[in-house]
Amino acid sequence: MRFQLNFKSGKPVYLQMVDQVKAAAASGALRGGDPLPSIRPLAEELRVNRNTVAKAYAELESQGVIETVAGKGCFLRAAHSPYRKEVRLELLKQVVDDAVVQAHHLQVARSQFLRLAEERFDAFEARRERAAER
């Protein structure tokens, strides 16, 4: 897994890492049981404090996305969502609400917003299928 960090984005680096691991898991680029890079070498590669990587991994573990095996490292959990479907939908509603507010501020019409969401969903599924074929 290759992380791409933007130090000027204003978003904490550890949260960027959390989002990227979750996106890789959702797209199929990472599969259940796949190992994550070790903390120290990854911190050196990304040129961040190792506590930043450890914080990202701790956050992923608290969300049930990864698990730590003592002496072996961190691995993506096979079933990476510990939440019930209703809870997952409620979490998604919050994200969609934020996107709707952003669309309103950017003066994007409802039909354009819905078309864009459908296009992004199609692109995501295409990436996921390509990852599954590898």
Image: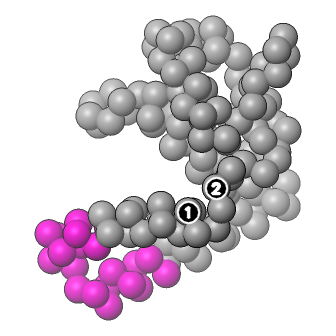
* Position of the C terminus by quadrant: bottom right
Figure check: 81 above or below 89? above
Of residues 76 and 85, the one drawn nearer to the viewer in this rendering? 85
Q: How is the image coloured?
A: one colour
Q: Which mark is residue 118?
A: none
Q: Is residue 80 visible?
A: yes
Q: Residues within 10 Å of mark 2 (few under 14, many from 20)?
A: few
Dot 1 falls on a residue whose secondary structure is helix
- Farthest bottom residue? 111
Q: Amino acid at mark 2?
A: Tyr
Residue at point 17%, 70% (across, down): 106
Image check: 104 left or right of 125?
Answer: left
Residue at point 82%, 36% (across, down): 34
Q: Which residue is mark 1?
A: 87
Figure check: 60 above or below 91? above
Q: Quadrant of residue 113?
A: bottom left
x and y percentages locating residue 70 in the rendered image: 82, 15
Question: Are the residues tagged 2 and 1 within 8 Å (C-beta)?
Answer: yes
x and y percentages locating residue 110 in the rendered image: 28, 87
The secondary structure making up most of the magenta span is helix
Q: Which mark is residue 83?
A: 2
Task: Give the Cα separation between the discs numbered 2 and 1.
Answer: 6 Å
Tell me if residue 49 is in the magenta stretch: no
Tell me if residue 115 is in the magenta stretch: yes
Magenta span covers which residues? 99-118
Figure check: 122 above or below 35? below
Of residues 83 and 74, the one drawn nearer to the viewer in this rendering? 83
